[in-house]
Amino acid sequence: MILTVKTSTGAYDITLRRGALSNVGECINTEKRALIVTDSGVPAQYAETVGAQFENCIIKTIPQGEKSKNFDTYRELLEVLSENEFSRSDCVVAVGGGVVGDLSGFTASTYMRGIDFYNIPTTLLSQVDSSIGGKTAIDFGGYKNTVGAFYQPKAVIIDPDVLKTLSDRQFNNGLAESIKMAATSDAVLFDIIENEDAFEKIDTVIERSLKIKRAVVQEDEKELGLRRVLNFGHTAAHAIETATGLGDYLHGECVAIGMLAFSSPSVRERLKKVLCKYNLPFDLKFESDELLAALRHDKKADSKGVNTVFVNEIGSFEFRFLDFSELDIIVKEAFIK
Ligand SMILES: NC(=O)c1ccc[n+]([C@@H]2O[C@H](COP(=O)([O-])OP(=O)(O)OC[C@H]3O[C@@H](n4cnc5c(N)ncnc54)[C@H](O)[C@@H]3O)[C@@H](O)[C@H]2O)c1
């Protein structure tokens, strides 16, 4: 299946097909010279399979994990490009999760003022979310995604077969982003995840999630309005990450808990059952007062309260301003001990 994403700087195709990894030539001009970036946790055969289809490529493997999304690794990639005399007609190809994708995209966006970038996401999170929408970044100064650019890929190639090697925890972490998108925008997708086995239905889950994300980023490419819907659960997730010191949970797991704080009681009940089904956390490991304190310090908060994405009914959402007294009631209700 091919989905076209229209952007202000042109359009690109997302190819979603089992076995696509072995046929990248259908989407990328493999006569171009390529820097293929992957990480040490991604099975090496994926980058090798992609590399074997290029006439000329270099594979660079960075250490796995968020710590690689930094200035030093960015600089290393620029050095590889520069030392090997990559030109404006060459390209960068990411074969990995969101870390590899964000870092490689940012490198491609800045080398020689921008060379072609192709994304081949290999985690569920990157297949349903981070590979689409053109956000690229590295972490800087102790904060996530501080230095980056909107830079659209030339093509995105999604092969669900690569998810077979992903751990259950990483799979469920990515699924949390699909649950998030379904809760705000697609009641049918929510129903599928709720009542069927998401792993068996993964092609449908990816396709429907991509369609939601595509619709949102096409309407609001630079996050000036509607794109904030993708932040459902994120305001509380950031507060949970702050309260837990970033150590205990993966990001999707924080989003899972975070969604509960900004849902009506009936939505919360359905969400809890779905999170439980996929071994995602649905309770706080600390007192709700700590979460409230962190929410007060969120960068999107003002002196009176916080702008939130709120779900009253599965498949729809509203942007709602909650003052701190309302927040207090909702958060305590969501996480009754
Ligand atoms: N650009 C965006 O719009 C956007 C959106 C959401 C998240 N992000 C970013 O994405 C990053 C998180 O991405 P992620 O969750 O994919 O994490 P990740 O890239 O760190 O991948 C998670 C782990 O899975 C391993 N892995 C990847 N593919 C595998 C496979 N097929 N089989 C086995 N192991 C595999 C990796 O080595 C890594 O250890 C964060 O940096 C976040 O800021 C970006």
Image (cartoon, rainbow, N blue to C red):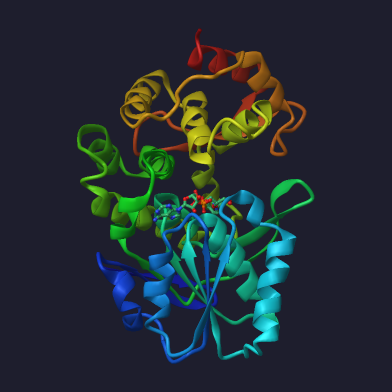
Left/right placement of residue 13 relative to residue 243 reads left
Q: Is residue 71 above or below residue 92?
A: above
In this rendered view, identify the residue nearer to me: 173 or 316: 173
**Place of residue 271 in the rendered image (x, y in percent of width and height, measured from the top left):** 37, 27
Q: Is residue 27 above or below residue 214?
A: below
Q: Is residue 327 above or below residue 61?
A: above
Left/right placement of residue 166 relative to residue 217 reads left
Residue 15 seen by the camera: yes
User: What residue lies at 55% left-to-right and 61% top-to-bottom?
Assistant: 100
Where on the picture, by quarter, is residue 55? bottom left
Left/right placement of residue 261 relative to residue 241 reads left
Left/right placement of residue 61 relative to residue 160 reads right
User: What residue lies at 56% left-to-right and 12% top-to-bottom?
Assistant: 332
User: What residue lies at 38% left-to-right and 67% top-to-bottom?
Assistant: 45
**Place of residue 190 in the rendered image (x, y in percent of width and height, measured from the top left):** 29, 38
In this rendered view, identify the residue nearer to me: 337 or 301: 337
Residue 221 seen by the camera: no
In this rendered view, identify the residue nearer to me: 56 or 191: 56
The quarter of the rendered structure image containing the N terminus is: bottom left
**Place of residue 159 in the rendered image (x, y in percent of width and height, measured from the top left):** 32, 63
Where on the picture, by quarter, is residue 267? top left
Where on the picture, by quarter, is residue 192? top left
**Place of residue 256 in the rendered image (x, y in percent of width and height, measured from the top left):** 46, 32
In this rendered view, identify the residue nearer to me: 48 or 87: 48
